[in-house]
Image (cartoon, rainbow, N blue to C red):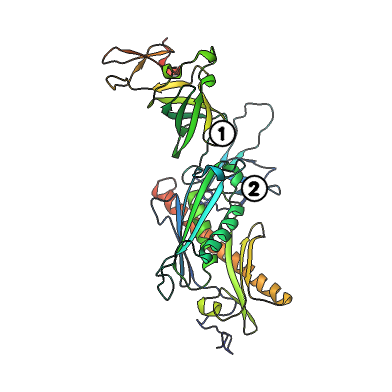
Amino acid sequence: MEFVSPEGLRLDGRRPRELRRINCQLDVLSNADGSAIFEMGNTKVLAAVFGPHAVTRRSELREEGALVVCEYSMAAFSTGERRRRGKGDRRSTELSMVIRNTLEQAVITELLPRSQIDVYVQVLQADGGTRCAAINAAVLALAAAGVPLRDLVCGCAAGYLDGTPLLDLNYTEDAGGGPDLCVALAPRLDSLYLVQMDNRLPVDTFQAVMELAREGCRTISGVMRQALLEHTQRLAVARGITAAV
Amino acid sequence: MSAADAQGVCVGDRLGTTDTYAAGEGVFVRDGFVIASVVGFKRVEVPAAAGELPQKPTLHVASRDTLPLVPKPGDIVTVKISRVAQTAAHALIMCVGRQALSTEFKGVIRQQDVRSTEIDRVVIYDCFRPGDIVRAEVVSLGDARSYYLSTAKNELGVVYAKSATAGAAMVPTSWVTMQCPDTQAVEKRKVAKLESLVSA
């Protein structure tokens, strides 16, 4: 199967360095302190943030900062084949931990000692890049909840198929057997919060793929920033804080 | 609000340098820049020219609700007494300063923190009862279970209590007693001395 045609088009008609279409919706749940739906192409992820509130398990209480708790799960209808997954399955536990580690570095935890922030991430539709979409949805939900963040952290994945670095793989490209590099970047601080890769890559190709993924992160960060500012502006107008521009 | 302020700022935006501004709420300082940590609108607070030294204006970012709040030592909090024991009164912290909390934190007023005089002869049941609303000060972050609170000042103590018999809101009559308006029964409490209650 060829993933990049001789004209340079991928299976879904994108160019190798092109992202899928991104859509952000904020404050989609009324009972959560902050919530967001992040769509990247067909991948659709819902994140809900509750907190900061008092720690539920005393043994895990942290004196120096907030405790970030994350739960990642996939809806049974999210994949092509409807399958009921338990919350305890290996992939969900691993991704919960990965997302939690990324978010803990992004949140300024020192400002909220002895408290707990719950982040729930639910994949509604999976088409490749779910862990990156999960990080993006969670960061949007945290910003919507007013939790102080160091930077607008974004996640993006890149791969290498048919001799070309490809940005933002969908499920078919992901399943093609090539390497899949997932990166979470804080764009203003220019520091990486997560680097994960499946399969193998020669080192020089790795540099090219890594740079492509970082570029993707910066672009997504711009889109998320725009969505947050528009949403805040709409809220401010609705509450009469500012006049409609 | 000026056109520039109506724009709104996002997490990670550089708002100014530390030479021009002092950092307020919703921002943090890094590499000499003041950077926003929440999404909201920029607000600059110019300090009143009271002192001799010219103060730098403070830069805040007001997010749509105020920042998530956690009690700190020194905060004046409003608590509701949940349980009264021999040596302590357990309470739920409901407001910090003037802001209500979305979730309750647990606090405890120990026998030695109830008042500043004769602290070893305090009878907790004569100071607080379950259901009383008390204004207290956070002394420390406490132990794993609750914050340590203190009412050892004149302006701290019970601000609202219902009488045991009639259930009506009681009127404070001294710093240790409150009276029910319906039954005229007098009950003991450690009453807060609020400015509105001080007679001329």
Residue name at image x 61 percent, y 79 percent = A178
Q: Is residue A244 visible?
A: no
> Closer to the N terminus: mark 1 or mark 2?
2
Q: How many neighbours does mark 2 have within 10 angstroms: few (below 14), some (14-19), or many (20 or more)? A: some
- Residue A101 picture quarter: bottom right
* Tag 2: amino acid: Gly
Between disc 1 and disc 2, the foreground one is 1
In the picture, the disc for residue B160 is: none
Q: Can residue A177 be seen in this view?
A: yes
Nearer to me, A219 or A156: A156
* Tag 1: amino acid: Asp
Q: Position of residue A25 (x, y in %)?
A: 44, 60
Relative placement, left or right, of A144 versus A109 is left
Determine the chain carrying the residue at label 1: B
Q: Mark 1 points at which residue?
A: B143
Q: Name the residue under label 2.
A: B16
Q: What element carries label 1?
A: loop
Q: Quadrant of the C terminus of chain B?
A: top left
Residue located farthest toward the bottom when viewing the structure as drawn = A6
